[in-house]
Image (spheres, rainbow, N blue to C red):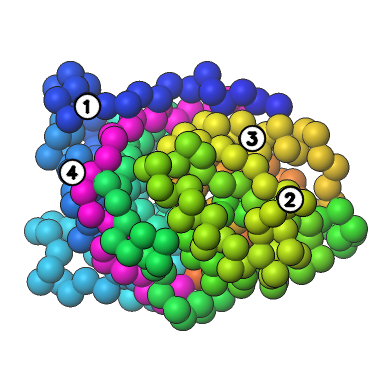
Amino acid sequence: MIDYSICYKRQLAPTDPYFATRQFDTLIAAFTSDKRSRALFDKINATRKQWVVFPEYGFQQSECPAGAFIGPDGADEAHLITSLLDTVVSQSDRICVDITGFLAPYLLFLIRSIAARGITTVEMLYAEPGRYLKSEETTFSGEEVRSVRQVYGFEGTHGADTTKDLLVVGAGYDHQLMKMVATTKEGARPIQIFGLPALQPDMYQQNILRAARAAEALGGRGVGEHADNHLVPAHDPFATATFLSKLIEDTPFTNLYLCPLATKPQVAGFGIFYVTECLAKPVSILYPFCGSFPKQTSDGIGRFWAYTIELDLK
């Protein structure tokens, strides 16, 4: 087991000296209509600041910031992120990534690609929501799921023996996506991770209410006395990675399938864990790929976080 809690994280006040003293070569941030996805862009000192626009958000070119890297329709996570990094990042760069507006597959492949390029340290920032627009009824993805597949770069070397397969789901609000993933791995033992402490006090209860709708698909283990549920802080990628590291140490499995559907810090935790411990093992990250995502899901801004991601922890 690796204790990722040794990695550095810091809560930032809006006037924190961090913003005046830290200098980066490149800042990458994803553009959405949420105020929080734009809150850190002007605060960070960077020689180059690059917006990236994911096609699933459905922005017209006239709505995008000047100079934004606009992903073409139909581009997968590998194609788009590789093109982005080839355009804006050199191997020696001090990179800062605001993960607030990133869609999960792109964030995962970004972590994988940065590690593959030999860049061992990257700073990641996150702005929490003040509230979700429709509380527990907030929708974070479109209804059209094109496919459930492995995220590129996170395909494991799986064996034919499936007797002790595990499916670990980072449980978010999108119960329909949880159902889709569970259906593809019906024989796997489901384990769910919920964010507690949540990003805001009421969000844990909202999360539980939504996840309960996927309980039947997850073998009746969604919420309840016998549920195989675990609690990990929603804002802490290192706590998520540490939980997963301990899980594979303590739990025998034939194949392990990971599905991060919760907060962006938890998604980053899944990616850090995989890149550090799971390459060339029977472990994959699955994701239900949707054709569209809403441009805005939250209102207001909560806490700011900075995470120093180390990708050479072996």
The disc labelled 4 sits on which kind of residue? Answer: Ala
Nearest to the eye among marks 2 and 3: give it. Answer: 2
Measured in 3D between alpha carbons, the distance from the residue under mark 1 to the one under mark 2, in whole angstroms, is 39 Å
The disc labelled 1 sits on which kind of residue? Answer: Ala
Q: Position of residue 66 (x, y in %)?
A: 9, 58
Q: Nearer the viewer, residue 50 or 303?
A: 303
Q: Secondary structure at mark 4?
A: loop
Residue indicated by mark 4: 39
The range drawn in magenta is 290-314
Q: Residue at x 41, y 75 (%)?
A: 142
Q: Residue at x 36, y 69 (%)?
A: 293
Nearest to the eye among marks 4 and 1: give it. Answer: 1
Residue 32 appears left or right of 221:
left
Q: Earlier in the sequence, mark 4 or mark 1?
A: 1
Q: Nearer the viewer, residue 36 or 97?
A: 36
Q: Is residue 282 above or below residue 215?
A: above
Residue indicated by mark 3: 243
Q: Secondary structure at mark 3?
A: helix
Q: Is residue 156 magenta?
A: no
Residue indicated by mark 1: 13
Q: Earlier in the sequence, mark 4 or mark 2?
A: 4
Q: Secondary structure at mark 1?
A: loop
Nearest to the eye among marks 1 and 2: give it. Answer: 2
Q: How many marks?
A: 4
Residue indicated by mark 2: 225
The disc labelled 2 sits on which kind of residue? Answer: Glu
Q: Earlier in the sequence, mark 3 or mark 4?
A: 4
In the rendered image, the quadrant that contains the N terminus is top right
